[in-house]
Amino acid sequence: MREIIYIQAGSFANYTGTHFWNTQESYFTYNDDDEPIVNHDLSFEEGRSPQNQSTLCPRLLAFDQKSNFGTLAKTKETDTATDASLNTTWRGGVIHETQDPIPQSEYHARLEGDVEEESDLVRPDSNIRYWSDYSRVFLDRKSIQAIPDVLESTEAGWSVGQELFRRYNEETELMEGAFRLLVENCDNFQGLQMMHDTATFGGFSHAFLTFFRDEFLKASTLNFSFLSGADPNHAGIDNSLDTKRIINDALCLQSLHQLSDITFPIFNPSRWSTLESALSQELSYDRNSLYHTSAVMSSLVETATLPLRLKGSRGDIAMIADHLNWRKCSRFGQLGGIVSLPFPATETTFTNLQCNFSTGLLNQDEHTVFARRNVTRGLLDQDLTAFNAWCDLSSLQEPLISSTHAPAYPVPTSFPSIFRHTRPASMRMTSSLVTAPSTAISLTGYARFVEQTARTRRSDGMLMNMGLESDDVKELASALWEIVDGYGNDRMDEGDT
């Protein structure tokens, strides 16, 4: 057994993660004659439901501000522990003020009610308030890591996030408690699959991974890093908030290059406008809705990582990282794919509709890559013929290109109604993990902006607020340029393979 521990940190990461776990739940089989397509033990362990009943729970730590947990926040016992501590140290009077409990979500009310048809669970999704509102799995108590709501904003607060982790770890014994227990429950722990929001949990995630690496040096890490909405190519240094966000993103990228085996930076949905022409072919979604955009993202992440969980698959995180980073200087990759593939699919379909969520571009002209890992869902023989023809447009050959063909992506009732046509029970799609020279384009934007910021005196006050000095930013720019050099104009590798 090669168990994976999953980390979700931040609101978008947890919205995406909730869809991810709902998909895992849809793979459960309840008939002895039905063989599941995935090995559930890799991602699930025995835990306790809110009713204290034994059940399968994700091997997960979910970090978010306490106010973002919705009804899940009440399952944590920290408030009770705090009250008990006050009672033993304070001899004066205590006034207890309690908030009204958060009511059950409409989806959960329908899920627990008498529903004759599963389709009756599908409703307009405007009433989703929290990512926990549409969860179909039980989270064990140790998975629920509700970070206290702090008065000081954590957005783009690199040093604030690191200090927040330090205090939280000291107060809750996170790494020696909940995380240690997750590891001990594994027969053969292989590593982490992590998703995090850089804007609000960048510094926090850096501190977590640093602590993790100190003890688990040989464990592998695969990271999907959700960047802020600030664009380094179109932001002005006079915009202090965008500057902080970009510097914070850059610090995250530098950290992940050091601490993660392979990382896929993901554009914020606010920057998906360049992908709209392809996405809108089959989808009708609200780009401002976390519930909608996280569903799109989760389908891509879940499909791209499916080979890690497929029954009979020998793949693991280390193998994926070694395959994509065979050049030893390509630790940043790209996530792309087609969500809701039209029928029939032709070579032109794959050329025109392939979206790259790490560059924000359509992949019509992206044939130069270092390595590619494709996963298709629900494709028929004629579709696979067209897909293989599309793959052949690149001169990349095995073993630097691999493809896994799996059953269609299941669409549970918790999935938003974002389909332009009739809502399907399952979805045809593709997802790819790629390393390519074009990664240098995005990294160059950050390196130039950071370098310019380091040279501008009027940015000193803003940097001080982030706990940084001008020399720190100069070193950051130098580190980013060094990473860029790893991709550079080196396109000879493709032609040599």
Image (cartoon, helix red, strand yellow):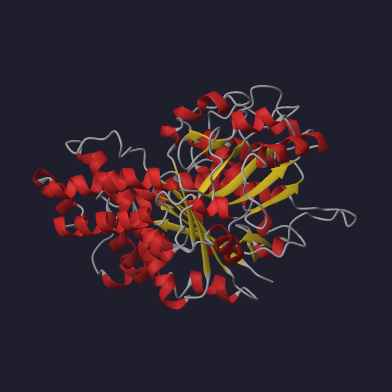
Q: How many marks?
A: 0
- The quadrant in which residue 215 appears is bottom left
Residue at the spot x=84%, y=56% of the render?
Answer: 35
Residue at the spot x=67%, y=47% of the render?
Answer: 375
Viewer-proximal residue, 286 or 236?
Answer: 236
- The quadrant in which residue 176 appears is bottom left
Question: Quadrant of the image for the C terminus?
Answer: bottom right
**Residue 287 can be seen, yes or no:** no
Question: Quadrant of the image for the N terminus?
Answer: bottom right
Q: Is residue 449 left or right of residue 367?
A: left
Viewer-proximal residue, 290 or 476?
Answer: 476
Residue 457: give x, y in percent of width and height. 9, 46
Residue at the spot x=63%, y=36% of the render?
Answer: 415
Residue 70: give x, y in percent of width and height. 48, 45
- Position of residue 231 relative to residue 403, above or below, is above
- The quadrant in which residue 107 appears is top right
Viewer-proximal residue, 381 or 428?
Answer: 381
Residue 408: give x, y in percent of width and height. 74, 41
**Residue 45 can be seen, yes or no:** yes
Q: Is residue 273 left or right of residue 58?
A: left
Residue 135: give x, y in percent of width and height. 60, 46
Q: Which residue in the rendered view is the most extreme toward the left?
A: 457
Q: Which residue in the rendered view is the most extreme toward the right?
A: 33
Residue at the spot x=34%, y=63% of the render?
Answer: 165
Q: Is residue 176 left or right of residue 89?
A: right
- Position of residue 195 relative to residue 297, above or below, is below
